[in-house]
Amino acid sequence: MNFQDQIEILKKQLNAKILAHNYIDLEVQQYADMIGDSLFLSRQAAKAENPVLVFCGVKFMAETAAVLAADKTVLIPEKTAYCTMAQMVGVDEVKTLKNKYPQAAVVCYVNSSLEVKAVSDVVCTSANAVEIVSKLEQHQIIFVPDQNLGAYVQYKLPQKEIILPSGFCYVHHEISDEDLIRLKEKYPEAEIIAHPECPLDTLKIADKVGSTSQMAKFVEQSDRSQFIICTEQGMLNKMSVDFPRKSIIVPLVPRYCYGMKKITVESLYNSLNLLRYKVDVDPELAGRARKAINRMLELS
Ligand code: SF4
């Protein structure tokens, strides 16, 4: 029996739901019940009725699912599937900033540790960061951990004062405006669509900025046929399959998230077969993080 059949059988036996992020390899995505960005997958985890959720993504995503679906067994196929940005800003740095700016609200991007979420007022995703910050009454906002997304929020909301940390996503941070200008000369008709984890100078010359799911919607609804897509390669692969009549152009060099690439068909099979790796979250920490996540779900 091949992996495909075995995965389908195990899924049925466990009554498991498989959630996969847009960056996950297509070979793995084919087994997923739900594919999307962090916000979409968080909502799906919160309302899932299956006793077992298998999260094909990086650790912070599986942790968020475990917080929102506390009565479920949440599995991640590879326990070392980390988001490097989520590890760049820790609780101590947030506490230092809170002491320095006592009036500020703490907004944490979902790409963060559970500990950081637990000391934040509200969580946001790349799909709703501007909306969430705009709805807060505080003028000063400590925005962690992504300096690029924070700078984009500041650009869109000049009336706010955004205090920026030092974190960044290595996948998006290197996508430069110079590269895009060169590509645009080569493909003058192409629409530039960028993820807000790219540097602000890059975002300023993009035609559209959005989360991975928003990017897919932009392509679907556009009457253009060529798109320069500034994000992780898995998303470009997915778009090429989903929109075969549209031409998806890579910005200079393909960019890979190595945490996401650790999730393979074999690790998914092992996860279902051996019920590994169970995502355990400290109940007290999860309770505080849940408040910040639920506030996001209420505000967006
Ligand atoms: S693409 Fe960047 S921000 Fe997203 S999971 Fe990978 S390292 Fe983290």
Image (cartoon, grey):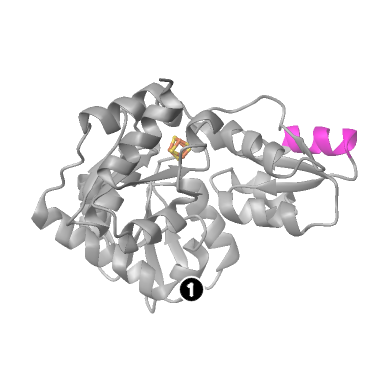
The C terminus: image quadrant: bottom left
Q: Secondary structure at mark 1?
A: helix
Residue in the image at 73% along x and 54% along y:
220
Tell me where residue 27 appears, x and y as whole percent. Answer: 52, 29
Image x and y of residue 33, in percent: 45, 48
Write down the residue under mark 1: 134
Instruction: Give the camera-side residue of 168 and 59.
Output: 59
Say which quarter of the image contains residue 107: bottom left
Task: Specify whether 277 is left or right of 176.
Answer: left
Crowd rating for badge 1 (residues with CA inside 10 Å; few <14, some 14–19, many 20+): some
Q: Is residue 86 in view from this perspective?
A: no
Please give the name of the residue rendered at 57% of the width and 33% of the height, measured from the top-left corner: 234
Q: Residue furthest front?
A: 1
Specify start and end residues of the magenta stretch as a single range.
178-187
Tell me if I can see residue 149 in this picture: yes
Q: Is residue 186 magenta?
A: yes
